[in-house]
Image: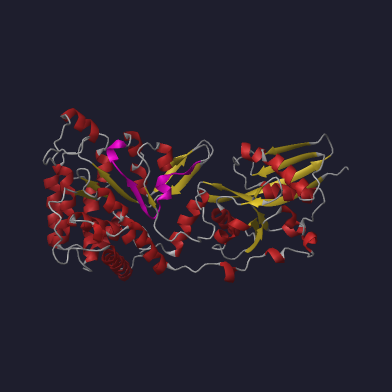
Amino acid sequence: MLFVVFSFIQSASVYGVDGKKISVEVDIASGLPQVNIVGLPDPAVRESVERVRAALKNSGFTFPLDRITVNLAPADLRKEGTSFDLAIAAGILTASGQLGLTPFERTLLIGELSLDGHIRPVSGVLAMLEQAKQSDLTRVLLPKENVEEALWISGMELFGITHLNQLDPNKNGSKDWEHLQVDRHVNRQAFNGVQNMNEQANGCGDYGDVIGQHQAKRAMLIAAAGKHNLLLSGPPGTGKTMMIRRLPGILPPLTEREALEVTKIYSVAGKLTDAGSGLITTPPFRAPHHTISSGGLVGGGSVPKPGEVTLAHRGVLYLDELPEFPRQVLEVLRQPLEDRIVTISRSKAVFQFPAKIMLAASFNPCPCGYYGHEYGDKQCTCSAIAIGRYRSKISGPLLDRIDLHVEVPRPLSFEGPPNGLHLTSFQMRQMVLSARAFHRDRLTSLGFSPEDELNVKTFKTSVMLRREASELLANAFEALGISLRVYDRMLKLARTIADLECSEYVEAEHVAEAIQYRRVEKQTAW
């Protein structure tokens, strides 16, 4: 059987957290039977030849015994993963004349093949479909298990496929794939933030269970209202971890746009394990172990993948026992905390990952945990050198980027709190929602967009600082010897405290409270 036939199928891959359209070009010519895949394929892509060969045979098709060349364009980008299997199989079938090419026009094909011809789900479907939509593709053939995820990209016809033989409409008694088309109105789940918010709170525990620690709970409230970074210090067993793990329960649910961002990241990372879950509508909470590497924290690899910082986008990144992390690992957080984005450079490309996170961290004051908090037989046994070495892992520039520094001492008794101070997670969540709503309305009335990141000039214009408050902040700058970065963060903290009280102006008492959250840093002699 001699033929020189060419076919052209559209597929996609993921680079960073964004999709990239990949053209699968297949040429079949006379010659010794062999298959060459070109276009910088990785081992998983090269191995697709054997998967496609077996899948075609076991699905009732014929694998051509000729010279087959598969080009993945653009050829200068490295290709990885198994999302090209379905497109390569379709390219071989159309090039060999077993299927017509017309049905595949303006159609994206993604999916992994098993040896018996079944279609397996792949990662990164949301990112791929976003790119396909921008490229004017109108139809998508994808694994049935990925349909729930794909439904959130509007304006495209979706066809859920479970087996390779479904590519041949004649085998199903039809001329097209209408029987595979997904009904969006029936399958797409409603976006219900209120219900999700209650589920989120129930899964995190209640701040009403925390004995004492009113200042720490107040700091949690402020951090949640203004998305501020938070650091808790104190001896073991005082509730630092307990309180931070309850933090997601008082955060508002994600908006639909934010939920799409987060879901896309988790799809790219291959962490969408529940096919029926729809969008991720709760703020992520990530708590990596202190043995994590720099690449694991911010992302890395020959083709970089998201790290824990990006997986915590729009949520909380919790670092427990902060000085136990290697210093070089902690230092990579500087740029993401400042720029709200992770930039990873490689020889052929620069990758950017979103990193709008709340950093929450906790630590003991010394290796044994009791320095400055001795009681009973709990006495600090650490030398000054050991304490200095322990604390030196947390650099000054990193501390500068943390807004609230709160000491969490041992509670003096089990007595209940004074009336009005025993806040539950439900009450704190309502206060956070009210403060954020006031913040949005106030910015809108001033002519700013609440969705945009304000630069230094526009932020200072939007703060609305009283003269007494401005003078107090200036005095604190001189007396405490703080940096200009800390000055700006104090100002943002004071503005959040004013938002919690629904105050148009930042008063002196708001600034005074903001200042006290930096005094712990001085008292502990960092």
Q: In the rendered view, how is the structure colored?
A: secondary structure
| Residue 224 sits above or below residue 346 on the image | below
Question: Residue 42: image x %, image y %?
Answer: 61, 37
Question: Residue 154: image x %, image y %?
Answer: 57, 65
Depth check, front residue: 270 or 412: 412
Q: Identify the image quadrant of residue 235.
A: top left
Seen at 41% across and 68% down, the residue is: 195
Q: Identify the image quadrant of residue 2.
A: top right
In this picture, residue 358 sits left or right of residue 472: right
Residue 321 colored magenta?
yes
Magenta range is 304-324
Q: Can residue 221 be seen by looking at this rendering?
A: no
Residue 74 colored magenta?
no
Give the residue furthest to the right. 1
Question: Residue 259: image x %, image y %?
Answer: 45, 60
Point out the image quarter for the C terminus.
top left
Seen at 34% across and 65% down, the residue is: 448
